[in-house]
Image: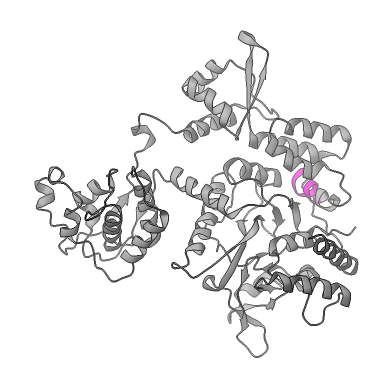
Amino acid sequence: MYNQTFWKAIDLITHDNTDTFKRRGSQADVLSRKVVQNFEKELGQRKGVHFVTRKKEDLSTKNGVKGYITTSKETLISNAANLTHWTPNQFRFGSYTDDERTLICGHRENNLQQVNTFVVDIDTQVNVDVPGILAASATYSIGTPTLILKTAKGFQVYFVLSDPAYISNKNQFKSLKVAKRISENIKKSLFKHIPGVDIGCNDFAFFRIPRPDNILYFNQEQTYDFLDLKRWSMTYTKNNNDFTVIEGEKKDIKYDPTQAKWFNQLINKTNLEGGKGQKGRNHAIFGLALALYAAGKTESEACDILDEFNSNLIKPLRNTEVEKCISSAFSGRYMGPKKSRIDLLFSDQEMDDEMKHSNAFKFKSTGYRVFKKHRKARKDRQYSHDYEWEMDVIQFIENKIMSGQTFLEGMNQNALAEEIGVPVASFKRLLQKSTKIVKKVEGQGRNAVTLLSTQAIILKSAIKAALQTKEKQSKDYANFIASHSPSVQKVVTVITQDNDELQGDISLFQQSNIRGSTERTLQINAKNGQNDWYKSKLIRFESS
């Protein structure tokens, strides 16, 4: 049976910034090419290139990466069955380094044209399955993925953008830095909940290409807005770095201003404003950045620390202003902060004898030191954040729930809050707001009891029920379970719909995650597949 999912995935990931048809040697009929090419010409979008390889070993030959450059979706789709890896994110140009045109170059970050997708590489299949990946992504990260591919030893998980994020060299490739931070945080959010997540994987390099035989899950409706991901990433960074210890390189540092009392005083100030003729927020951030630079910290580490400092200000600066200060401090034009300029940030009352006679600004050898971020640990704070209470409740549910259960046995909400250790008011507010905790109330009044579960538990139960059999009874049960969580319903709908089109994927699901049998290879009729693809492109373009 022909599985067309792979070309839909390639089409979705590449957006409209790759030519649809080959410029030379296309197998499409002349009319099809003319209609589509005229439409693409009217759009006027800059086209990018992708790099591909025929086998994994080609990624690391002694002379470089062996492969070729593609400029069209037709090439990607018609050759996909014979390829293993590609760059799903597009580059501005590519070239060859040998006369035979077999060794490729240009797949470097400063040549990246746009980000189409974020990809998480999972290096193991032990204790990892598709329901688990979906559940962890929905519960602990940005949401369920668009695409899951099976690799020789693990999985690769795609989170596709609804529109590409374009990379510019303005402001020291600011857009690239934002994209890298999003990618890093997605991987970090899944690292503790999915075995084998590769934190160090290159964010925008080569990944497995969708093929007729490797797609385990695909939901083309599940795409992400880049600005939404940026906001999520900022919140994730703020909420998950309370106890980060930042270690500079163990090198010979002439002096370490972060050991000085003024540094700890300044980084804890929240009432800086500044104004005409006064030294304020920009000046403070620049001085702190210089101190971190002199202490041997990296620019990325300084961004983490000073982003938190700025967030704690009563009137914080715009992120662009913070980034300018840090970039300037790390430009190499300065050796460290000047005492006379730092003094202007403190009033006389704040300048005690130790501060006035500080020698922290003199060059001296103080050795290696670890700088710990200044936010208080939870045990040292009087109050907890809602997201911390939420994790407490989720952990309680996961520890208490029995195998095969979807919900914990019902209890009174006050009793539940007391057992978990959450204030009753916070607990009730959390049950109303949380998208990760699912509640079901049975009974009324004093006799009412609350049954608790998590989105992850419900998602796993619903998916496994949907995959066990194609009978209507099983589908109805899966939909009933999913009805307790709207976001879970979307995933289950993809699986439990009439599966003439997705039958191949359901079989892969069953074999990989239910019975554990050997994955079967789906056969593709390339000619019919291409005709279907051309037809779908024409219909879409004509309706635009």
The residue that appears at 88% across and 59% down in the rendered structure is 2
Eyeballing the image, is 52 above or below 506?
below
The residue that appears at 74% across and 52% down in the rendered structure is 218
> In the displayed structure, does residue 232 sit left or right of residue 171?
right
Look at the image and tell me whether residue 373 can be seen. yes
> In the displayed structure, does residue 278 sit left or right of residue 106?
left
> In the displayed structure, does residue 78 sit left or right of residue 313?
right
Look at the image and tell me whether residue 122 can be seen. no
User: From the image, which quarter does the N terminus lie in?
Assistant: bottom right
The residue that appears at 42% across and 46% down in the rendered structure is 241
Q: Toward which corner of the image does residue 5 lie, by quadrant?
A: bottom right
Eyeballing the image, is 301 above or below 374?
below
Q: Which span of residues is magenta-colored?
A: 508-519
> In the displayed structure, does residue 464 sit left or right of residue 197?
right
Give coordinates of residue 16: x percent, y percent.
71, 66
Q: Is residue 515 magenta?
A: yes
Give coordinates of residue 507: x percent, y percent.
83, 49
Return the residue found at the far top. Answer: 446
Eyeballing the image, is 240 above or below 77?
above
Give coordinates of residue 500: x percent, y percent.
89, 50
Residue nearer the viewer, 188 or 194: 188
Give coordinates of residue 293: x percent, y percent.
30, 62
Q: Toward which corner of the image does residue 204 lie, by quadrant?
A: bottom right
User: From the image, which quarter does the C terminus lie in?
Assistant: bottom right
Residue nearer the viewer, 501 or 351: 351
